[in-house]
Amino acid sequence: MDTISISLTESCQGTCRNVTIHEAGIQGQLHIPAGTLNGEIVSFTVRGVRHRVKVRVEPDGTHRVEGRNLRREVRLNRKDGPTGREIALDTPIGPVKLPVTGDTKTGSVWTVKGYGIPDPRGGTPGDLIVTAQVQEENGPGCLILLAIVAGAIALIISSNFGVQFPGSETARGIFQEAQRQLAKVGYARQPYESATEAQISDLKHLMLLEVNERRSEAGLLPVRMGSNRSAQIHAEVALEHCYSSHWDRYGLKPLYRYALTGGDQYANENVEGIDYCVKEGENYRVNSYERLREKVAEAVEGWMNSPGHRRNILDPRHKVLHIGIAEDRHRANMVQVFSGDYVSWSEKPQVGPDGTLTASGMMRGAYLEPKSSNVAIFTISYHHPTHSLTQSQLSGTYCLESDKRAGVILKPLGQGRHYPKIRGNRNFYEEAVSNEQCIDPYELDPNGPIPQTWEEANETHARAKADSGSAPLEASVKYGMVADTLAVGNRGTEFSLKADVSPMLEHYGPGIYTLISWATIEETGEEEVISEFPIWWETEPPKDHPYRTGK
């Protein structure tokens, strides 16, 4: 399919182009309606034949597209004039004027209704969202700094050359008083202003745009912004306690955090951060809003250069991206949690006191009947009960695979038929299996060394990566359990499950059992995991964990 590039202004106002369809060797005039977004397909007819063209909207360097909203920054300087004035901006829709008041500061936001990208179907247009970046006037520190310089020069001449000149003692007094005043007004160490809520939201949307641009280049559909809070909470807790692991200090991994915060699909995570506490005086750049924007782009680029993280960003299954960003003076922790949107649960998975597993629901964009008979619809993994982890244990991890393959739910075969592996009157079989393993943080020394510098953190990370890549396979027992009921209807989009899983529970005991749902994705035709639902059986999450619905 041919691609045509247009400007953001043309996207907002509409345009006409003479285009050539190279495959057909024909030319025609293409009308691109106002509101056409990047990646959308438009068509035109030549000689009775309909042709399709993909539209690429080139970024204009000032405005960022978020759905149909446009975002941009405007730089202000207090010395440019008094408050109570207006500033004029050119936008892809047309000029606008924004009021500047005494309350206008860095992070202040103006929203201009209807000045975003129109809806070509006649719906509500997007908005223009403008964030202020205010450069304050030079304060008293400039005069104080000049006094320090003058006093210091006088002291150097007096001390090193023995020259006493009129005002030497005065200069010494000025120097000492200037030092006191400098500390008083805070110029000895400029205070750090954390990013505002609006700026964090802007950074998250920037990351979403970066991800969707990579997906578009790979021919994939975009993901939409999610609302699950697990990514944001994980970023904040990890920043506070100086780690950047997929695991956290409560002993939880991404899926558990996602589920505890209300998620019921699956959770694939990318993480960016530093595994040690930056100390005062270390040679790190102080964060600013612009620097944080750079870090977002750097994080996505870094993930794209890492095979595992790249696969996550370019996984065609993903529908939703939940983003967490937390920052302080020098550091920024960034978390991506990708999920699907395939399962609508009418009864979420649960295990009763008698060991009966039940679940039911409907599929969206997938169907449960696998193409190949050897693919199970439901499998189960096991993880032992959780407890808190130390910073040393967290810094020594790299990846996540530490669950045991514990079970598979088998479809009833009907009267008179049975599975070859099942003997006698039992409704299950057991077999030895091996499991791919990463370094399990629970097996690391909780009192081990904690990285104190960037070099030590980098060495620890590299060692954890190497150890995970060479970790031996771990043996476990997998139970094949015939379901009492495993009904799949409406062309594979509805399901109902009831199965006795007590043999597996008796073998493994208390822990987290994750019901894994497999289905065929309609868009790709591939059989994939479309849901992972953890069930806490005879154990509970840590009581002090912060991952709760609505927080």
Image (spheres, rainbow, N blue to C red):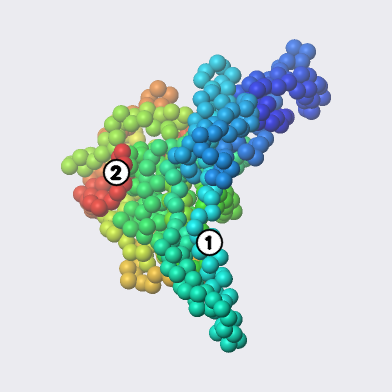
Q: Name the residue nearer the viewer: 289 or 121.
A: 289
**Which residue appears at 26% of the width and 50% of the height?**
541
In the rendered image, residue 359, in percent from the top left (x then y), is placed at: 29, 34
Judging by the rendered image, the residue that carries numbered circle 1 is: 143
**Which residue appears at 47% of the width and 74% of the height?**
173
**Which residue appears at 52% of the width and 52% of the height?**
288
Q: Quadrant of residue 91?
A: top right
Q: Is residue 214 shown above or below 182? A: above
Question: What residue occupies the far bottom of the structure in this picture?
Answer: 162
Secondary structure found at label 1: helix
In the rendered image, residue 202, in percent from the top left (x then y), is placed at: 50, 41
Q: Earlier in the sequence, mark 1 or mark 2?
A: 1
Q: What's the amino acid at mark 1?
A: Leu
Work out whether residue 29 can be spotted.
yes
In the rendered image, residue 12, in percent from the top left (x then y), is placed at: 63, 25
Q: Name the residue nearer the viewer: 512 or 160.
A: 160
Secondary structure found at label 2: loop
Work out whether residue 66 can be spotted.
no
Q: Is residue 229 shown above or below 243? A: above
In the rendered image, residue 330, in percent from the top left (x then y), is placed at: 48, 59
Q: Quadrant of residue 89?
A: top right
Q: Where is the N terminus found, in terms of image quarters?
A: top right
**Which residue appears at 53% of the width and 61% of the height?**
143
Q: What's the amino acid at mark 2?
A: Arg
Gap between marks 1 and 2 measured at Cα: 51 Å
Left/right of residue 438 with respect to residue 302 in the rendered view? left
Left/right of residue 442 with respect to residue 190 in the rendered view? left
Judging by the rendered image, the residue that carries numbered circle 2 is: 548
Q: Is residue 333 shown above or below 202? A: below
